[in-house]
Amino acid sequence: MYSDKENINILTALLIAHGVRHAVVCPGSRNAPIVHNLAQCPELTCYPVSDERSAAFCAMGIAMRTALPTVVCVTSGTALLNTVPAVAEAFYQRVPLVVISADRPQQWIDQLDGQTLPQPQALERFVRKSVTLPEVHSGDSEGHWYCNRLVNEALLAAVACGGSPVHINVPISRPLYNFSCPSLPAERRITRITATGADITPMLHDLHDAKRPVIVIGQQHKGEVPEDIIDKLNSRRYVVLQEPLGGARGGCLDAMLPVKGNDFPTPDFILYAGRTLVSGTIKEYLRNAEDARCWRIDDTGDITDTFMNLTGVIAAPTAEVLRAIDGHGDDRWYDRWQQLRKHATEHIRSYNPPFSSLLAVKSFEERLSAKDPTATVFYGNSMAVRMGCVYAHHHIECNRGVNGIEGSMSTAAGWSLVSTGNVYCVIGDLSFFYDRNALWNSRLRGNLRILLLNNGGGAIFEKFSRLTDANDIRNVKATYRTSARGVCSDNGADYRVAAEREQLSDGLRWLTNDVSDRPRVLEVETDAATDWKSYQQCIANNI
């Protein structure tokens, strides 16, 4: 029988799955449930050693001889610190030493309780990866996923790049000695492939077996995945989901998915390349594909489990892997997505927005395509980039690493300093005024053009319909009315304002025409409620 602690059982199952076959175990009460589990596994050989310093070096010697990741398991408190000499040696010798430390619950650290000290990151300088597992309770699916992911990350780090020590810290609450679980759970093991060609055979095998495969391309630098690769995947009738942040062929994924409640199947295979996605709807949809084989392409080899179902990561350039894809997608599955794409495109094209930020973006993108198609376009975060995804037919630049509102205009300004072409920044009012000092730069030129969408607050907060209290509206939605006229005057930028359709048309002609020696700012004054409603109507998919 195994421990009733779910995090310990997840850890034990994954140690076996990742090929650990030897464990040096030290005495102690807090780590007793872990040691019990290890001793119960027929695949593992345990070696009891009382001195933690010696035990860690003993485990290192086993790892050196077998070339396998090897465990040293210690109890809480200073027992962990006694492993430091061996961990440092293993770090510089590149030995896959897996230090597992039992820990007290977080709330008892630094409270004068026995054998407690801050254990997370205690070995950080000399380990490639340090994780602290959550205490997972029955029914906590996200906690289970998180614990599984952390153990996978640590054990993959132990064998990466020739080997390295890692630290897995395991908080354990009382009671410690309930051994009532009859078997270890069947845990997902994440794998890592470090080259292309024949080595990506496992991924290709999953792809060829799939009936409903999708290839998802998140944000990337322009040209990172050449358009001919996307054309090739489409010609092979593979479903490619891509936003303008991922390439010029991208579209609004929020508008493509059917409304909730519609009977639309999830994929059985996902290949995810690039970085973040704007669409929360598509992420929720792909997270529901619990049984899908999901592969990630990331040249760093990092474990990024965005959809909570990662099978493996391929550490190679995205374009190189995508070019190696052969075979043919399922025609019925491909045609079904094409129907969604066509319906979304026709709905967006036919929708005529009222005077709003959405109309401003739509009109801007139409004019840009005709008058300045080679320009670089930055979008601010939140509503601005979502509207950009609806109408842009070019690559979008955006600070989407952590999605913050600060610095969007400064990043576009920096790009403009070293660019010969025009650089446009489409930005909301909160982002603009937060980053107003982007214009406080004497080297800025007339190639920086800013479309400011000012609706007096954060339009995206309109989705919180229950925020009707006056204090909530002021404090959460950040409502106010401030003009950019003074900011532009103070910093020598040309300025115009548009508060209705005709002024918007004239303003966009001014923004995109002519040569200027100073930055230009067109401020479009709209209403937040109208902005949110028009966006929702534009992306509504009732297929």
Image (cartoon, grey):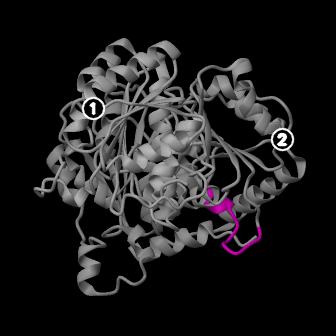
* Main SS class of the magenta portion in the image: loop
Q: Which residue is mark 2?
A: 209
Query: Is 273 part of what is drawn in magenta?
Result: no
The answer to whether 443 appears left or right of 363 in the picture is left
Instruction: Give the image location of residue 95, x and y in percent.
Output: 41, 18
Instruction: State how far apart marks 1 and 2 are (Cα).
Output: 42 Å
Instruction: Give the image location of residue 231, x and y in percent.
Output: 75, 34
Instruction: Give the image location of residue 195, x and y in percent.
Output: 62, 19
- Decide if residue 274 is in sight here: no
Question: What is the crowding at mark 1: few (fewer than 14 residues within 10 Å), some, or many (at least 20)?
Answer: few
| Mark 2 element type | helix
Amino acid type, callout 1 = Glu
- Determine whether 479 is above or below 419 in the image: below
Amino acid type, callout 2 = Asp
Q: Residue furthest right?
A: 331
* In-front residue for pair 475/215: 215
Q: Which residues are magenta?
A: 253-263
The answer to whether 23 appears left or right of 242 in the picture is left
* In-front residue for pair 511/382: 382
Query: Which mark is on residue 363?
Result: none
- Decide if residue 252 is in sight here: yes
- Determine whether 438 is above or below 433 in the image: above
Q: Residue at x 29, y 60 (%)?
A: 430
Q: Residue at x 36, y 12 (%)?
A: 93
- Give the mark nearest the N terminus, 1 or 2: 1
Q: Which residue is mark 1?
A: 124
* In-front residue for pair 398/422: 398
Evaluate if marks 1 and 2 touch, with contact meaning CB atoms under 8 Å apart: no
The answer to whether 146 appears left or right of 225 in the picture is left
* In-front residue for pair 401/71: 71
Q: Residue furthest left?
A: 112
Instruction: Give the image location of residue 36, x and y in percent.
Output: 45, 46
